[in-house]
Image (spheres, grey):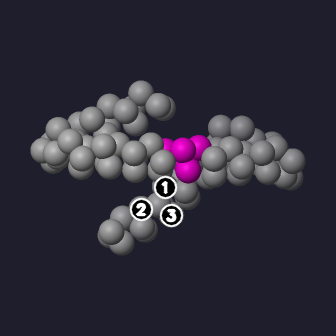
């Protein structure tokens, strides 16, 4: 959720002892990343509403699987910067 993202970036800024500019850059980067994930996830969920998914997988189960795959995708980008 949004509160978790705000708390997470605050804790990271404090733990890493970032300066003011570094904290602003990290916070903006975290916000842009969170926005990107929300946009991608909403697009996927819209497509899943019209997709022919098994009845037992509709709703939360398929959303959890998509979230897991999206998380693994972003995890792969971890060492690039």
Residue located at (32% from left, 31% from top)? 7
Q: Which residues are magenta?
A: 34-38
Q: Which mark is residue 73?
A: 3
- As measured in the structure, the alpha-carbon distance from the residue carrying label 2 to the one carrying label 3 is 5 Å
Residue located at (37% from left, 33% from top)? 6
What residue is pinned by disc 2? Answer: 75
Crowd tier of the residue under label 3, counting other residues whose Cα lies within 10 Å: few below 14, some 14–19, many 20 or above: few
Q: Give the secondary structure at mark 2.
A: helix
Q: Which mark is residue 9?
A: none
- As measured in the structure, the alpha-carbon distance from the residue carrying label 1 to the one carrying label 2 is 6 Å
Say if residue 40 shows up in the picture: yes
Relative to 6, residue 38 above or below: below
2 and 3 marks in contact (CB < 8 Å): yes
In-image side of 52 versus 30 (left or right): right
The image shows residue 8 at horizontal and vertical percentages of 32, 37
- As measured in the structure, the alpha-carbon distance from the residue carrying label 1 to the one carrying label 3 is 5 Å
In the rendered image, the residue lying farthest to the front is 21
Residue located at (75% from left, 41% from top)? 58
Q: How many marks?
A: 3
The image shows residue 46 at horizontal and vertical percentages of 78, 45
What residue is pinned by disc 1? Answer: 71
In-image side of 42 versus 10 (left or right): right
Q: Give the secondary structure at mark 1.
A: helix
In-image side of 48 versus 68 (left or right): right
């Amino acid at each position: 959720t949004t509160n978790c993202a705000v708390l997470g970036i605050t804790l990271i800024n404090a733990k890493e002892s970032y300066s003011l500019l570094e904290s602003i850059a990290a916070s903006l980067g975290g916000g842009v990343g969170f926005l990107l994930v929300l946009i991608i996830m909403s697009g996927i969920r819209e497509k899943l509403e019209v997709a022919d998914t098994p009845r037992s997988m509709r709703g939360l189960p398929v959303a959890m699987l998509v979230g897991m795959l999206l998380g693994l995708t972003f995890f792969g980008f971890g060492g690039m910067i």
